[in-house]
Amino acid sequence: MAATNIEVWQQGEIIEISQAANDIKKIVIRQSKPAKADPGSHIDLMVKANGEMVRRSYSVVSQSEDLKDLTLGVFLVPNSRGGSIAVHELNVGDQLDITQPLQNFPLRVGAERYVLIAGGIGVTAIMAMAAVLKRIGANYTLMYAARSRDAMAFREELEALHGENLQIFFDEDKNFIQIPELIASLDDNTELYICGPIRLMDAVRRTWLDSELENTNLRFETFGASGWYDPEEFIVRIPAKNVEVLVNKQHSMLEALEAAGVDMLSDCRKGECGLCEVRVLNLKGRVDHRDVFYSERQKEENEKISCCVSRIVTSESGLAADASGPALVEIVTT
């Protein structure tokens, strides 16, 4: 689902920071080379985390009319690799390297009906789409789920703009999106856009694929770092190249191999394109497949891994506290 992007780097200045919800900050950045942010676009930025510069991607929530200012919503990720912590520590006036807006998640205008689903911080990738659909008078429903009222960012402005088009769900009320009923109510004239935690996206994707709906009408944006298990340290070994690397919690397998000097192919770095695929020779532990590239059958076979996002774990419960690692995976690079 990745689209071709041309990266243009520029300077960004933090001009506003406020609290959007618990652990979520609203950050406004002024571009030195203003460019338009189409709905579903994001920017990449460089921040210093754990002593090194790292690159992170954040969706553009909105843009000022003169195109200069981009609003982001940044969630302080549990078990963060350091990027979200570093962004939360930024101050007004700070300068940082940012790209002009990039596009991997475009909105196609012209469908008879739209359903937009946002889970948690996934709303940041959906808000600009919903605003466009409102402006052009489209037939749309925005479904927004969060753990609690305190954890729901941008709620007031969404309610003010979308009114009855907005449906809100809170885990704390045990009020969940009824996915089978929703999918069953759709037809081939409906496009569904979703961004959220992997469990929500996986449930929607599975139900959609089991239906007779057109596959191309389901469109999604991934977080990349969202997984089924807490991240653990693990070892990746490439016997043919006599390479062994410890992948820590702060880096992906792809990043660790690149840092070790291994030539790797990659593009989206979000588990969508499959270009970074590696083949598994031996496995001690289990694969935490975090991609949306492979089918369920392929994931169960554990013969291939999207190494930009997927990890190896030992925990049975999914909690890092229960890990007995380090896990080990031997691979062949393509």
Image (tube, helix red, strand yellow):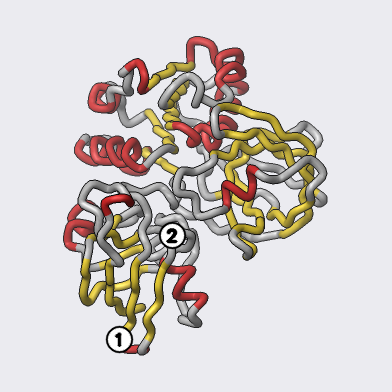
Residue lying furthest top: 164
**Disc sitting over residue 59 in the figure:** none
Q: Nearer the viewer, residue 200 or 87?
A: 87
197 vs 142: above or below: below
Please tell me how crowded label 1 is: few (under 14), some (14-19), or many (20+) other residues with Cα within 10 Å.
few
Return the disc, 2 or 1, that comes first in the chain's sequence. Answer: 1
Q: Residue at x 44, y 51 (%)?
A: 225
x and y, in percent, of residue 109 in the image: 53, 33
319 vs 326: above or below: above
x and y, in percent, of residue 309 in the image: 40, 58
Q: Tell us which disc is closer to us: 2 or 1.
A: 2
Residue at numbered disc 1: 239
- The answer to whether residue 270 is left or right of residue 184 is right
x and y, in percent, of residue 218 in the image: 37, 39
Q: How many marks?
A: 2
x and y, in percent, of residue 80 in the image: 49, 50
Describe the element under mark 2 as helix, strand or loop: loop
Question: Could you tell me if residue 113 is visible in this image?
Answer: no
Kind of residue indicated by mark 1: Pro
- The answer to whether residue 293 is left or right of residue 33 is left
- The answer to whether residue 183 is left or right of residue 300 is right
